[in-house]
Image: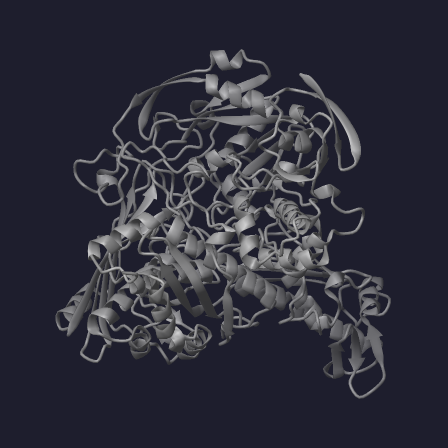
Amino acid sequence: MSDGIGARVKRKEDKRFITGKGKYTDDIRMENQAYAAFVRSPHAHAKVTGIDASAAEAMDGVIAVLNGAQLTGDGIGNIITGWAITSKDGSPMNIGAWSALATEKVRYVGDAVAVVIAETQAQARLAAEAVDVDYEELAPSVSTAKTLQDNQPLVHDEIANNLCFDWEIGDEAKTDAALSGAAHITEIELTNNRLSPNAMEPRAAIAVFDSAEDHYTLYTTSQNPHVARLVLSAFYNVAPEHKLRVIAPDVGGGFGSKIYIYPEEITCLWASMKTGRSVKWTADRSEAFMTDAHGRDHVTKARMGFDDTGKIVGFKVDTIANIGAYASLFATATPTYLYGTLLSGQYDIPAIYGNVKAVYTNTVPVDAYRGAGRPEATYLIERIVEKAAREMGRDVADLRRTNFIRAFPYQTQVLLAYDSGDFDTVLDMAQKAADVAGFPARKAEAASRGKLRGLGYSCFIEACGLAPSAAAGSLGAGVGLWESAEVRVNPVGTIEILTGTHSHGQGHETTFCQLASDRFGIPVENVSIVHGDTDKVQFGMGTYGSRSGPVGMSAVMKALDKVEAKVKKIVAHSLEASEDDIVIEGGEAKVAGTDKKMAWHEIGLAAYMAHNLPEGMEPGLKETSFFDPVNFSFPSGTFICEVEVDPETGVTQIVQFVAADDFGTIINPMIVEGQVHGGVTQGIGQALLEGVVYDDEGQLLTGSYMDYTMPRADDVPSYVIGHGCTPSPNNPLGLKGCGEAGAIGAPPAVINAIVDAIGTENIEMPATPQRVWAAIQATQMPVAAE
Amino acid sequence: MTNVSMTVNGKAVSRDIPDTTLLSDFLREELRLTGTHVGCDTSQCGACVVHVDGKAVKACTALAVSLEGAAVTTIEGIANGGLHPMQTAFNDHHGLQCGFCTPGMIMAGIDIVNRYKAQGRSLSEEAIRDELEGNICRCTGYHNIVKAIEDAAAKM
């Protein structure tokens, strides 16, 4: 079937986007709509000693100026983090209170202290400038590496040394013993740079309070509207769930940053109730840089030990993870269960120990950003393995092969049990595509032009398909991470699939339809997706962690199973045949070995007419399923990056990038490849271009696209993509997830290539021309052109 | 308030607007043509690209009152009922994911192709990548956008 699983079906949702008819939150206008503008702290750390709103209140169009004391006075709850982490001494993590509007203290530049509601956006913004807030400035703690030190200011007065938790994983004694007996030890110190996710659609919200029904509707830029409703209701006390509808219409990218329920949505809902107006807020890009959760920001020291054959004997990791001023929704899970559990990489490592200290600083919260924890683990492992290979005089690919895991399932020393993979085959595929054999000639040719060529690898594995609920629960999660689906076959035979996941660019409206098309042989045009509205879909956990395929589609498959079973009963009854003889294909159900059949629309009609159903069967054709995986899925792959560095300028050009992945089964290769292109580009952005910078006073220096370097079309090459396939045994389709792989795997491939080119390990991300040039100068290596 | 009259997508429009109104706000809020998107506040991202008198302009950079008598074309106005070859090419080549940058990309793409054709220059991958410097996409990694523009160039 041309529209089925594995087909490159063009996207059904494209038409509205290419014609300008997409409907994003900011495109919606409500009756009686007013606008919100937030009064934000210009200081990284200060006491709020007074708010004088009188001048603002007198300005044209101003409806209300509301503050944090009013918000908490109305019982709006503090913002929560979703995962409880226990420190290695058994103590619970330390959480600082986070009110949607700060009351006594502000803790980062951009922390909101009040909101102005006005008739127009311009009036609201002007009035916000006129709100007079008295601040008593305090010294900030900004540095990830230093914030734990005794002399540092405290972000939260009650939290000593700014320590959220001091967590460990693995066996320290065993690892120390292994390292002490190692034939070779490689050490590394590195920083995983701080990033701003930068979905192109800025965050936005429209809150609509209906006083007659005591009902709220929130339109918002969310990756997970159902979780938003749950949290807004259960923790922030906005309204009980049946009085709160959350709609995420078209969402313009997320990359993690739109998972969280931010202060602005909470405040808009509350302000709508306070003012009796629909309240709209749309961030500008400056606000996005200041207030969207950032990503990464680790400082790490690690040691890896090898025996005399190159076999890894132990790996010890010490990481400080910055979570910013407040613990955001996934902030505590990201540097622990999404990082420490991946420290074995693709390698059979008999002893691993990881220690992670999560710390507060006077910066915006840091949370999950595309890959979330797994890029940090991959960058560390793949840097240290290549460094070790160079130190030991081994080929970088060969050393990896010496250590590859080859038997599955494989229980790592850090909780996870990998279900499947074939690392050798994928590495072979990547090496062939990258023409590794021809590299020395290309390097020599580049040298003749005065350029330095380098080749870098990254062999990554990630845990995706978040997540088995029981496992998540045992690790401290506040929710289960199953997914729901409903398949509705209409009387005319068209199908609606309801899912609790929500696309913000991933093409669900096409790929989810392919499942039904594949199952029943009907065209994708006759199938549609319903998502992003808590009034339409019962519940779901949203889209992140590459979970929509492995978890969301699995729920759809289970619901399709139920539909298929009922269809067979109906058809067998109508055609007086045995259920076992019914075959569904090509949009009809046939009795095998006969010419008896029913067209798909006749089956739908029969189910709803209910004139002739098997005895006891309920009318209708609609089935629901919840899928809870038994394990994570484990996508893996090998990326090979080839760079050319100009030693005169330090400019790095990526001349070739090969991405060979194993995502298990692929529903739509066109869309999967698109995910890889985008993910790799974000990874290249991290490696070469992007970096959030706060100065020592906690001022954000990278607050616009003039200062924060986004990858542009001429910064990246066209990509070479390959797919291996070991299906996941833990879901019905064998899916592993593909959304994050590019961002996870790319950074070490790029940096390893630069290291290979310039001959020094002393290079940090982003490897800007200035840094690369300085690193080359430090080596005092003769310039090839001369 | 100043009165401004212009042609938008072939239709004459006239409005009294504050002098500070950006073309992007004029299109989105006054005319409710919400296909023109605003992704930044420093004229860097290009989500708001429209055509003014046949040339690509970032609508967030132009004051509406400065465009008296101008002919503006937005993403909603590039095809009469059907699809422009550039729109078709973006669908054919999976040149969009979240769709937010897409209107600006398509408007920039049409402008690039038109300029190169007018100058009799051929449009290589390198030239397309160079020309797209004013448009940011966070989803696609540009790979398929470049392919789409290459393909549309052959059909325009």
- Say which quadrant the N terminus of chain B sits in: top right
Between A283 and A705, the residue placed more toward the observer is A705
Residue A356 in sight in this render: no
Q: Please give left or right for residue B63 compared with residue A308 in the image.
A: right
Q: Please give left or right for residue B41 compared with residue A179 in the image.
A: right
Between A21 and A457, the residue placed more toward the observer is A457
Q: In percent of the image, x 63 and y 63: which residue is there?
A: A511
The answer to whether A178 is drawn above or below residue A36 in the figure is below
* Chosen colour scheme: one colour
Q: Please give left or right for residue A139 compared with residue A542 in the image.
A: left
- Say which quadrant the C terminus of chain B sits in: bottom right
Q: In percent of the image, x 70 and y 28: which residue is there?
A: B30
The answer to whether A623 is drawn above or below residue A686 in the figure is below
Q: How many marks?
A: 0
The answer to whether A54 is drawn above or below residue B6 in the figure is above
Tell me which corner region of the image, top left, top right, bottom left or bottom right, holds residue A136.
top left
Q: In percent of the image, x 64 and y 28: which residue is there?
A: A211
Tell me which corner region of the image, top left, top right, bottom left or bottom right, holds residue B78.
top right
Q: Position of residue A195 (x, y in %)?
A: 39, 47
Q: Position of residue A164 (x, y in %)?
A: 29, 44
The answer to whether A64 is drawn above or below residue A737 in the figure is above
Give the farthest residue toward the bottom. A593
Tell me which corner region of the image, top left, top right, bottom left or bottom right, holds residue A292.
top left
Q: Position of residue A258 (x, y in %)?
A: 50, 45
Q: Position of residue A234 (x, y in %)?
A: 50, 41
Between A740 and B69, the residue placed more toward the observer is B69
